[in-house]
Image (tube, rainbow, N blue to C red):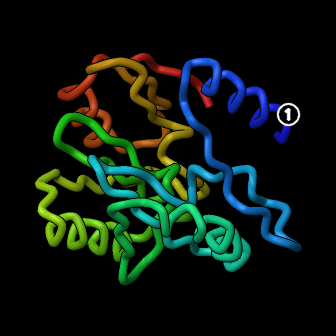
């Protein structure tokens, strides 16, 4: 994972992107999934609210970076991780899997409203337990085009996706 992260950072830097890395948190060897700890909506960095204590430790490594950001949103309740958050047009799709709760979705909706961000927050339910993150079963790959593992969602939700995207079905 570290080799992949280093290669990705080099690739970004080769395109003129400045890469900032979170500080290492002693005793925490799960810092290789930073996309779960926070996400950006418009010009606001939203700090996640991880369900597991070990993931909460990882956030301490972000503190020096967060202090440098102009707009940061802290959520008041529930749990939410970045792997469950996908932006589309004026919507924020949020998966309700093992790591994100409806209370976390409501907290995100409230915080966006208080910041003047008028995006619809759409909770996305799964048709079965054991789903960790939305982005592992649904992902937008181009405007109006998405990959989907249809058997992870109810027929009603798949129909909703079909109204908004051209879908490319994939297997688990």
Q: What residue appears at the point 24 percent right and 33 percent down from the top-left corner? A: 159
Quarter of the image holding residue 74? Answer: bottom left
Judge left or right: residue 40 versus residue 52.
left
Q: Position of residue 170 (x, y in %)?
A: 53, 22
Q: Mark 1 sits on what residue?
A: 3
Q: What residue appears at the point 45 percent right and 35 percent down from the top-left corner? A: 138
Q: Nearer the viewer, residue 147 or 56?
A: 56
Identify whether 134 is placed above or below 109: above
Q: Quadrant of the C terminus?
A: top right
Residue lying farthest to the bottom in this orientation: 76
Q: Nearer the viewer, residue 136 or 57?
A: 57
Judge left or right: residue 40 versus residue 43.
right
Identify whether 32 is placed above or below 171: below
Q: Residues within 10 Å of mark 1 (few under 14, many from 20)?
A: few
Circle 1 SS class: helix
Q: How many marks?
A: 1
Q: Position of residue 154 (x, y in %)?
A: 36, 44
Quarter of the image holding residue 132? Answer: bottom right
Q: Position of residue 150 (x, y in %)?
A: 44, 32
Judge left or right: residue 107 versus residue 14.
left
Q: Nearer the viewer, residue 106 or 90?
A: 90
Q: What residue appears at the point 39 percent right and 28 percent down from the top-left corner? A: 140
Q: Nearer the viewer, residue 140 or 96?
A: 140
Q: Quadrant of the N terminus?
A: top right
Q: Position of residue 57 (x, y in %)?
A: 70, 76
């Amino acid at each position: 994972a570290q080799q992949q992260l280093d290669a990705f950072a080099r690739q970004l830097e080769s395109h003129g992107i400045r890469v900032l890395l979170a500080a290492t948190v002693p005793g925490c060897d799960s810092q290789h999934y930073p996309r779960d700890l926070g996400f950006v909506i418009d010009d606001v960095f939203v700090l996640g609210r991880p369900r597991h204590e070990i993931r909460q430790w990882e956030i301490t490594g972000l503190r020096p970076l967060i202090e440098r950001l102009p707009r940061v949103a802290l959520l008041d309740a529930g749990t939410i991780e970045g792997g469950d958050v996908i932006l589309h047009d004026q919507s924020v799709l949020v998966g309700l899997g093992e790591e994100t709760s409806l209370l976390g979705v409501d907290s995100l909706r409230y915080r966006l409203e208080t910041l003047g961000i008028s995006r619809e927050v759409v909770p996305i339910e799964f048709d079965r337990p054991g789903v960790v993150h939305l982005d592992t079963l649904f992902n937008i790959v181009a405007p109006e085009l998405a990959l989907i593992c249809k058997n992870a969602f109810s027929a009603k939700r798949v129909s909703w996706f079909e109204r908004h995207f051209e879908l490319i079905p994939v297997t688990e």
